[in-house]
Image (cartoon, coloured by chain):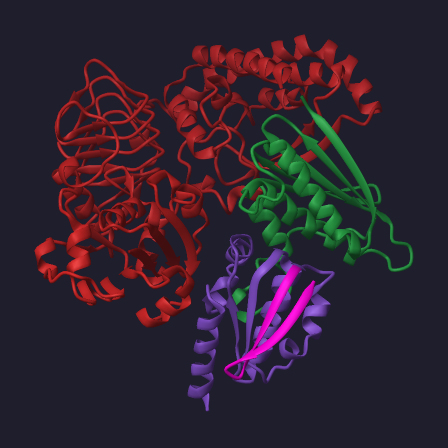
Chain colours: A green, B red, C purple
């Protein structure tokens, strides 16, 4: 059966950990075999990392005065977990080039990490919202 | 006793180029990943813990080996810099090494060993320093000195550097010849020189000539001759009347009809000549030798029948579509998302309007079960842009990562053969593409229609039980 | 995040404890030993329970500045979770990584000697 969990947080950096830890806990529930504190479960770590990246991205691009909310929606299915991160910032593309590691870049790893740890990543613009959807099979 | 396995990207770079689909450390020799031979050897020498060090990515290897529990040892992973010397490596892994004796195995080398030997005693008895060497790498003993006085040459260990497709081919063949006597090899076999994996379908008229090693999920169709000296990987289909001798057929490969493969390495759609490393792509006429007719003429009945059945389906699905579509659209569940896929010719693209249907709720489930999300795609069949049933469409975005453009047999369909067959690991594109290539070679308009209904019914089942 | 700093063999050892993400990396960058490009540092990551791209970026950035001044940053005691983030991004290629702080300090001191 499909289960949907939604969490809305202010788009502020201090909530990144909460978002990432929630993602880890949801992933642990879906995974079923591992404890959320299990540091070696690839599935749990992937969601913690991907949501941390996506939420940071939303929070960093948020308009400073208003802090529009960021909504995380987890859709748990039998063999797959999908999380969507929705914010109302300016549109952005997810087609960033892979950073050239030899030149010691300080940024640009975020999307690379998301793509590597998730099975499918899509971005779409829905009205005035950015929606990144990330899913991974068990 | 503990072991450090040190392998550098520059040593295996050739393998990445020759076999891009597989991590060089997982490259199979006689159907067993290379790294497992190293692990086996380390265990034979009495190691309780192994650390694998590499300057390249190890994620795939780690996913395969996990923590070594499978072998009863403690396996960990780390990184090194390409020019780290042995003392530096011992320093970087000081906590791992502790005060135990350490065997450092470096280089992308195949170790010739014999599982019947008592390496634990021999290695323990050998003095510190190089034990066996080969090019830049070799086996070096360090740390707490041993107790015995055995000489290294007693062990009868030698190394083959794996530095080209030629040496890889030779090492594989040598492993197959020496067989399960010397090495721990996968598969079971009632007699020596013949190892067969799980789920292998061998037609009656197949001839097997020893020595052979056959992996899991393999289909050998009528009249094929396998061996002598054939290594067939996993998820392989060898089609009718083909023969494979003195060759390696790597995982996920489909060999077409009436092919004679001798002294070659087949990997996906590539046939590699091991000595020169030269490769040719098996193009349609060779790979799919069943198709002899003029392609345009042959395609006509298929186009016609696909279009007729698509028309029938449009007629049948129109009432539920007209009913459900407005309802789902209003409740925001019908989300059109444009997609661009590679067309059947492999050079152009087709723009499609796909729909993502969150199939929860009675209406959503019903719509998904009836495959209404693909309703609009049916119209593309009428124009001949899509087949009713064919390959899983490859999106134009993916073209870069996957070898979609190198795919010799590809005919995007509204439904896919993989869906009809419920092929295990339908999500894994490599596995599914083998089934699809098989059907593309063998289907005719009538079986296509049968497979289409099978795929359709499978989807109903899948969506209802999901 | 808790950052502690000790000196061994004339080399600063900076030990991180906690989470290194976008929220905590300004604190990391502000650490005097990390921020000073003229100082070689061993970074002990054993107690880092989570690191993301921002944390990784700040470590890479600090290393770049140090290397421009003939100094370096060495990593020690990475746990598996942190190691995987380095591996995904290929950043492990940029660093000498040790599983023991003591060994890292010795190596760092040796390199510093060689530089002089």
Foreground: C104 or C111?
C104
In the displayed orientation, state which residue is furthest to the bottom.
C116
Residue C5 located within the stretch drawn in magenta = yes
Whether B206 is drawn above or below B281: the answer is above
Residue lying furthest right? A65
**Horizontal arrangement in the rendering, residue A105 relative to residue B401 (left or right):** right
Q: Would you say residue A74 sits in the magenta stretch?
A: no
Residue B161: quarter of image = bottom left
- The residue most toward the left is B154
Q: Could you say where residue C109 lies in the image, as x and y percent from the top left?
A: 46, 82
Q: With B188 as the anchor, is C13 left or right in this view?
A: right
> As displayed, is residue B184 above or below residue B379?
below
A63 left or right, relative to B51: right
Give the residue furthest to the front: B147
What percent of the width, then of the height, locates residue A30? 63, 32
Residue at the location (61% across, 59% down)? C48
What segment is highlighted magenta in the picture? C1-18
């Amino acid at each position: 059966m499909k289960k949907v969990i939604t969490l809305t947080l202010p788009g502020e950096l201090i909530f990144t950990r909460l978002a990432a830890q929630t993602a880890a806990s949801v992933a642990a529930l879906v995974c079923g075999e591992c404890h959320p504190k299990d540091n070696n479960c690839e599935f749990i770590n992937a969601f913690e990392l991907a949501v941390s990246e996506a939420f940071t991205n939303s929070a960093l691009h948020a308009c400073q005065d208003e802090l529009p909310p960021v909504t995380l929606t987890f859709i748990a299915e039998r063999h797959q977990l999908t999380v969507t991160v929705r914010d109302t910032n300016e549109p952005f593309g997810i087609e960033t080039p892979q950073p050239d590691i030899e030149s010691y870049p300080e940024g640009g790893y975020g999307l690379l990490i998301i793509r590597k740890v998730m099975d499918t990543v899509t971005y779409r613009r829905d009205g005035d919202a950015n929606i990144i959807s990330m899913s991974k099979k068990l | 006793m503990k072991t450090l396995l040190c392998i550098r990207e520059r040593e295996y770079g050739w393998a990445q180029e020759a076999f891009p689909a597989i991590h060089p450390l997982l490259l199979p020799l006689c159907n067993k990943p290379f790294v497992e031979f190293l692990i086996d050897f380390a265990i034979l020498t009495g190691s309780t813990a192994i650390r694998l060090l590499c300057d390249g990515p190890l994620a795939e290897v780690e996913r395969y080996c996990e923590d070594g529990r499978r072998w009863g040892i403690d396996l960990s992973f780390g990184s090194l810099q390409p020019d780290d010397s042995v003392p530096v490596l011992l320093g970087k892994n000081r906590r791992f090494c502790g005060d135990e004796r350490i065997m450092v195995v470096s280089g992308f080398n195949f170790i010739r060993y014999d599982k019947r030997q008592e390496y634990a005693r021999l290695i323990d008895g050998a003095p510190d320093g190089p034990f066996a060497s080969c090019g830049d790498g070799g086996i070096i003993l360090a740390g707490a000195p041993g107790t015995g006085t055995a000489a290294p040459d007693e062990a009868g260990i030698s190394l083959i550097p794996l530095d080209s497709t030629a040496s890889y081919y030779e090492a594989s063949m040598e492993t197959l010849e020496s067989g399960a006597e010397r090495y721990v090899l996968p598969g079971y076999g009632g007699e020596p020189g013949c190892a067969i994996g799980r789920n292998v379908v061998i037609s009656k008229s197949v001839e097997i000539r020893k020595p052979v090693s056959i992996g899991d999920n393999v289909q050998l169709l009528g009249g094929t001759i396998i061996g002598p000296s054939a290594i067939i990987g996993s998820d392989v289909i060898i089609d009718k009347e083909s023969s494979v001798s003195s060759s390696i057929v790597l995982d996920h490969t489909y060999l077409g009809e009436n092919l004679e493969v001798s002294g070659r390495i087949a990997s996906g759609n590539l046939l590699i000549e091991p000595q020169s490393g030269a490769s040719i792509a098996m193009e349609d006429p060779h790979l799919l030798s069943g198709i002899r007719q003029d392609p345009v003429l042959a395609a006509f009945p298929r186009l016609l029948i696909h279009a007729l059945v698509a028309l029938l389906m449009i007629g049948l699905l129109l009432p539920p579509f007209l009913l459900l579509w407005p309802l789902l659209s209003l409740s925001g569940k019908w989300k059109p998302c444009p997609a661009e896929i590679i067309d059947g010719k492999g050079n152009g693209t087709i723009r499609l309007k796909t729909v993502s249907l969150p199939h929860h709720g009675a209406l959503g489930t019903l719509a998904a079960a009836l495959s209404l999300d693909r309703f609009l795609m049916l119209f593309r069949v009428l124009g001949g842009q899509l087949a009713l049933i064919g390959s899983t469409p490859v999106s134009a975005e993916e073209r870069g990562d996957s070898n979609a453009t190198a795919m010799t047999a590809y005919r995007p369909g509204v439904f896919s053969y993989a869906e009809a067959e419920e092929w295990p690991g339908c999500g894994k594109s490599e596995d599914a593409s083998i089934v699809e290539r098989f059907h593309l070679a063998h289907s005719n308009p009538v079986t296509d229609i049968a497979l289409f209904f099978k795929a359709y019914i499978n989807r109903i089942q899948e969506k209802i039980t999901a | 995040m808790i950052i502690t700093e000790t000196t061994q063999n004339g080399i600063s050892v900076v030990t991180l404890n906690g989470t290194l993400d976008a929220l905590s990396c300004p604190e990391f960058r502000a650490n005097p030993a990390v921020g000073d490009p003229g100082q070689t540092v061993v970074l002990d990551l054993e107690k880092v329970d989570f690191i993301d791209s921002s944390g990784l970026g700040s470590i890479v950035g600090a290393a770049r500045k140090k290397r421009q001044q003939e100094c370096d940053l060495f990593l020690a005691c990475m746990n598996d979770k942190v190691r995987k983030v380095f591996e995904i991004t290929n950043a492990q290629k940029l660093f000498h990584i040790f599983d023991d702080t003591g060994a890292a300090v010795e190596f760092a001191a040796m390199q510093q000697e060689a530089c002089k």
